[in-house]
Each structure stands twice: as C-alpha cells, then as structure tokens.
Amino acid sequence: MSDLINSASLRLREVIMEALGALVAEEKIPAEPLPPFNIEIPADKSHGDFAANTAMVCAKALRMPPRKIAELICEKLSLEGTIFERAEVAGPGFLNFFLSRKWFSDVVRNVLDEGENYGKTDLGKGKRVLVEFVSANPTGPMHIGNARGGAIGDCLASVLQWAGYHAEREFYVNDAGNQIEKFGKSLSLRYMQLCSEKGQQLIYEYRDDTEKLCSEIYAKSGEGEDFEMPEDVYLGTDIIEHAANYYHDHIFELQELSEEERRKALVDYALPINIAGLERDLKKYRIVYDNWFRESTVHAKNETKKVVDKLMEAGKAYEQDGAIWFRATEYGLDKDFVLRRSNGLYTYIVPDIAYHYDKLVTRNFDKAINVLGADHHGYVPRLKAALTALGVDADKLDVVLMQMVMLVRNGEVVKLSKRSGKAITLVTLLDEIPIDAARFFFNLREANSQFEFDLDLAIEKSSQNPVYYVQYAHARICSLLRNLSDEGVAIPDTADLDLLDNPREIELIRHLASLPREIDMAAKSYDPSKITKYSIDLATLFHRFYDACSVKNAENEQIRDARILLCVAVRQTLRNALEILNIDRPEKM
C-alpha cells in the first residue's frame, strides 16, 4: 500500500542530504553535526509542493547566512531520475520543491490499482489496541454525550484499523456498584407506589396504556404529590416503565419481601433488559463491539481485593482509621485517596484499576484508549498513578476527553435534563435525524472542542449540510458514469493521465494523494474528525473540478478518458473515507 506523499518526502530528504554531503566533500561547508530539519507541504502551492527549512536550521552550525546555504544546496541538488521537477530558494532561505507531472499521474494510478484498500497504511504494524467508548451506565437510556462518544470511539477504532493496528472495540458494563444500588432503590420505590391505593387507581384507569400510565405517574412526582421521589434516585420514565411491566407480570409478589430482596428481584429483571437495549440501540447506530466486559466479573474474580493487596504489599498503600489509602502524592498528585473505606467497601476507582490492569496485563494489549467525558479529567491521573504503582506502564493508557454537545433547533439551544426523564436520548435523536448525519456531525470537531449540533441542518438536503454535500459528490460521479455509459462511453482501462494538467485537476489529485497521510495523522492524534474534514475538502475540490473541467464535452477523447479515470479515483477515495466513518455511499440522490 503506497503513500506517495510520504515516499516523496523521504526521497526529498535523501536528495537534500546527498547535496549536503557533496558540499562537505568539496569543503564548501564545514563537516559539522547538523540539526534535524523539517519537510512540509506549503499551504500556498505557489511556494511549491514541498518546502524544507534545512538552510534555516543549519545556519548556526555552518556559520553562514541561511540564504547562502540554500543557494549552495540548490546548486548541488541532483533531481534527475527523481519525482521532482525543480527547486528554488525563497525568502531568507527556504527551499521549495516542485513535483513532476508524472507524480500526479502516479497518484491516480495508485488509487485505481489499490481500490478499496487505498489509504491503508502500516503505521501500527499490527499492534493490539483496545478502544473503550460509551460504557454508559445500564441504568437508563443513552444520552447525547454517549451519542458523540459512540461516533468518535467507533470511527477512531476504524481509523486505527486503516492505519495498520489491530483495534478492538469494548463496552464496559457498569453492572455493579453505587449506580446499581441506586437503580434498585429507584425501581423498588416505583413498584411500591404502583402497589399503593393511588397506584392501583391509575393502573385500573390506564390498564391498556402503559405509556400513559408512566406519564401520569411521572407528572404526579412533584413535591407534595403522592408519587414524590427523593433526590438520590433515578427519576426517568424508564424506571416507572420497568416497575409497571414487572407489576403487570407479577402483581404483588414483591410487596411483602424485604427491601433488599425486592431490589434484587427488580434489578435482575430490569438490568438485562437495559443491557440488551444498549446493544440494540448501538447496533442501530452502526456500532458493533468486539467485547462487552462486565464490571461484575471484576468483583466475581475478587480482582478488586487483589489489586489493593498488591499495592499494600508494594508499600504503595497504607491503612489509616480503618481505611486503606493510596500514596498518590508519591506520583505527583495533590493528595492521597481512599481505596477501601473503613466499612470494608471499595471506592469506585478500585474496580477501574482492576479493569485496566486486566486490559494491559492480563489481556496484554499494547495500548488502551478510553473515550471519556471531560468531567473525568481529574480521574485519569489517579488511575494512571495506581497503574504505575502496580508496575504497569501507564503510557500504555491514553484517554480522549470529550467536551459537551449542545443541541440547537431554530437557532436556540435545546434544553436537556438527564435527571428529569425528558432528555433527548440517542434513540430519540436517531428517530429525528438520519444515522449518517449523526455519525458525521459528531465527528466534525475534535473531541476536546465543544460542539453545537444543528438539528435543522442535519436533515437539510442542501450543500449547507456537510454529510449531504459529501454524499452528493459521490452520487454525482456515479450519475456521470451512468450517463456516459448510456451514451456508449465506458470507463477506459487506460488513459494518458499526464494530460491532467488543469490547476483544478492538479489540486484535486494532490488531495487524493493525502488520504494515507491524513489517516496516519488521525491515528496518531486520536482524531477521526480529520477524516470528515478530508471528505468535505475532497467533495469541494471535486465539485470545483467538475464545474471547470467538462468530462462529457472534453476537448478530445484522450482528455475525456483521463478525466473519467480521475472521477473514478475520486469516487473510490470518497468511498474509502466514508467507509472509515461508516457512512452510506449513495449512488443516487
């Protein structure tokens, strides 16, 4: 699999080093160790296809003005037989290089030859990476933050796969701990309300309409009402629905049980339904996990006790007032923190430490990547410090912190209330907007930037909608090729691609060449938004080319055939970019 930009950059570095070597041999520059120099792609293409700052960084070592060094290098450059056509000195000493026409032809051929594999690289060299994302508590429906995390995490795993890593997707199911206790308490309270006299009246009144029953109970849950709920429970209508469904199937069978038994029965009933719902809803969102890892397995294997014992044995934890504390200050943190409370219960971070120990030691992944909300910024240093104390290389754990999403409709922010039960969930979002739009929009910005999701724009069928704009470019090419075929013009096997020398053609081809590089950059920075931006730019450049360079009415058949192959290469590249994002590639729109 070829990355012609990277190959050109490496070859250019060799050419420059050869010129420097020749200058040293001729004693035109001193034989001094030289600092590393950069080879970049200028934003302004009038400055060349590549630029090197060699002369600028070597000025001090060589004790010469940068411009003089650049001129000497230019005199000794041997470009014959390379993909470079010419070089020139610019400004105070920059070296600008211009690619030959053959390189651009090779790019189109490369895309056509590699087809559906175009863009794949070997950056990762098969290293095993575990990407954990969403991992929503199974106590209720997924919210908008989960929707963004799902799109980012899934596309990040795909980017890593295209960059040559063996990437696996994992959902960590929090099916133990405080949130499950809270879940059980919430279910029990709602169940007992249904068993009350007022609850029985509502059940009779709405016996054929569970949704209406839940809405009425929710409406009567305000302060002073018969169905009032305390602050430390889940208030969503999904809790009422679980309790109502259990009641319809089992009537009063839990009423006389102890609170603990009743909570356990309700959790055992509702939790599997919720987890199945998470999996179903994520599949609708086109996310399929390789692993569903349950927190309860960590407790069942006693892994929490094992990691705390390891820390105690290593002298990295200590006992005080009946509690066990981690020596966090030894790892640069402000204060130590509790691992096990004086009542014998472990704090929330201990199962997470055990879970990540399992990832990096037991399962031996080369890298673990977590996509988490920005509110976890204080949690990450704690987790890394504990892993280090356990002898784990904490650099193997990377965390992508994701900022909040604001939904906008009619120019106004949509009010969200996760606690009230009236939040827009992942499911209700996907009922309102296309899945393609959701996945594309949530990857329009870097994870660490706040994002306004325009609900009106997401359903708009116009060039203002970025996913529609990109898909339309793909469909436009398909339509062009169909129309040509109807007129008896087939896709040629070969063409003289050197005829593609219009500035619009050149800039389009140059962008085609950059897909492998963008994939590598996205993989290195854990930023799949680079692929959405690449897709938008490619669509823009194609539309410009199509408007400026007629395919059907080209000057002659030779140019027409070359442009047809260019269109096929653009279509293939768009397909590959959209496949990374798991976005549909319509052939008609």
Image (tube, rainbow, N blue to C red):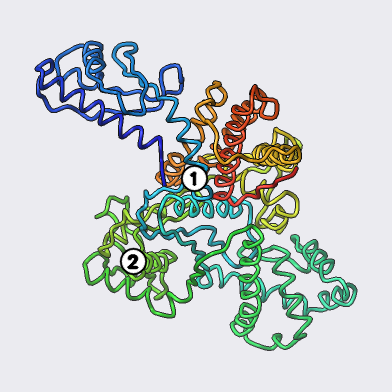
Q: Dot 2 corresponds to which residue?
A: 364
Residue 408 appears in view: no
Q: CA separation, marks 1 and 2?
A: 37 Å
Crowding at label 1, few (<14), some or many (≥20) Cα neighbours within 10 Å? few
x, y percent for residue 273:
66, 74
Q: Quadrant of the C terminus?
A: top right
Q: Quadrant of residue 577?
A: top right
- Residue 238 versus residue 263: which sits nearer the camera? 238
Pair 1/2: label in front: 1
Residue at x 32%, y 67% (from the top left corner): 361
**Amino acid type, label 1:** Asp
| Residue 9: percent from left, percent from top | 34, 32
Name the mark on residue 428.
Answer: none
Q: Mark 1: which secondary structure?
A: helix
Q: Is residue 519 visible?
A: yes
**Residue 155: image location, x then y, percent:** 53, 51
Q: Are marks 1 and 2 in contact (CB under 8 Å)?
A: no
Viewer-proximal residue among 349 and 164: 164
Q: Residues within 10 Å of mark 2 (few under 14, many from 20)?
A: some
Point out residue 459 in the picture as x, y percentages from the top left corner. Answer: 74, 43
